[in-house]
Image (cartoon, rainbow, N blue to C red):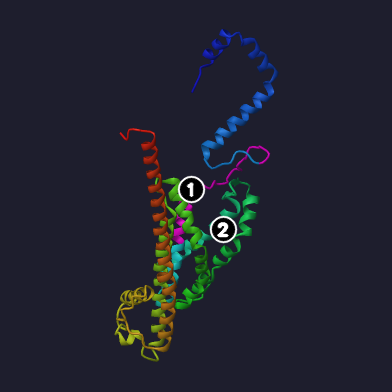
Amino acid sequence: FQLRMATFLNGLDDYQLSSQFREYLAAHHSSLQEAKASIENTITNLSSSKMVKFFDANDDIVKVPKGVILPDSNFRVVWDITLFWGLLYLITSIPLQISFAGIGMVNLIIDLFVDAFFLLDVYCRLRKFAVVKNGYLVSRPNDFGKLYRETDFHLDLVCVFPASILAFAFGVRNQYYGICRLFQFLRVLSFVKYLEGVTEILSTKTRFTVTTATLRLTQIFMIILILTHWFSCSFHFIGDQGAEFDDTWIIVDEMQHESLGRRYLRSFYWSLYTITTIGYGSVPVISIRERLFSMLAMAVGAVICDAGLTAVLASILQNKDKQAGTNNRRIQCTKLFMATNDVDER
């Protein structure tokens, strides 16, 4: 609704209120100027981010310091998605580097880029990235830096320790390079947080709504795939380390002369049917270490797949049945109301 100033003044003249209006303007000129400045500042902040909380407990306008990046900005969206993909790279590449002892120049460059990116993320969270805490925007670097130091800073600081880079500089090229990257592997402890952040981005920036049921299913399936990858790398590592002294699954299955890709595919196949408790048994388990590790994989699979996945699916079906029952009761109540009050169903 908009009203031109000339029309507004003519309306005041019609009701003989022009003199009173001018007297009010003269008496409250300073306060009106302050209110105008506050409104203009509010509009400016609103145009920069819809998530800015303009008023704190004392009704003072929140001022975003120069250089601070707001949580819902496009830059932060791209940054957080890139962090999630970097985390996926870490938790998949490090077990491969330990198990297959392969590190080339391309792998090193990617590792350097990912490590530098996470190191820059630590600095940005200390000095550049504003956060929302309990519904309020924390935009001062000292404040959100303090919050970060009290939560994830220590873990992130351990995860950026460049042990693998130092090892590579001293000529380490085998699986010990991957073992040194276990510092970066600790970032897996923040996997759920990163996944929830990406889910929130999908909900706020797109029309795609991620329900709780969808999020739970996504989490459980990603956990199953990641665990399958880890167990396949570990199973290959056990078989490869013992192949020089005793028969292992690699020797009995005649995989010692196959490529690393075929070995990984074979061990992944074993890991998948073991963790999902299907248990085809087509990959031989020979040594004591392999059998002990297989029992561990079965136990983990029983908890994650049998108990975990079944519980999630049962919870989803229960919620669906509950919602269907609620909708059915509403329909019956509506029909009863219409019948009692002689309402035409048309």
Query: What's the residue at 40%, 60% (across, down)?
Result: 217
Residue ID for mark 1: 75
Q: Is residue 140 above or below residue 179?
A: above
- In the rendered structure, does residue 61 fall within the stretch colored magenta? yes
Query: What's the residue at 63%, 49% (across, down)?
Result: 141
The single residue placed furthest to the front in the displayed view is 340
- Answer few, some or many: residues within 10 Å of disc 2's Cα (few below 14, many 20 plus, some between 14 and 19): many
Hey, which quadrant is residue 109 in on the image? Answer: bottom left
For the C terminus, the quadrant is top left
Q: Position of residue 30 (x, y in %)?
A: 69, 23
Q: How many marks?
A: 2
Residue ID for mark 2: 122
Q: Which residues are magenta?
A: 57-86
Tell me the tag on residue 136.
none
The single residue placed furthest to the right in the displayed view is 27
State left or right for residue 80 relative to residue 247. right
Give the SS element for disc 2: helix
Hey, which quadrant is residue 320 in on the image? Answer: bottom left
Depth check: 159 or 205 in front?
205
Q: Position of residue 35 (x, y in %)?
A: 64, 28
Depth check: 315 or 170 in front?
315
Pick whichever of labels 2 and 1 is earlier in the sequence. Answer: 1
Depth check: 314 or 39 in front?
314
Amino acid carrying label 2: it is: Val
Give the SS element for disc 1: helix
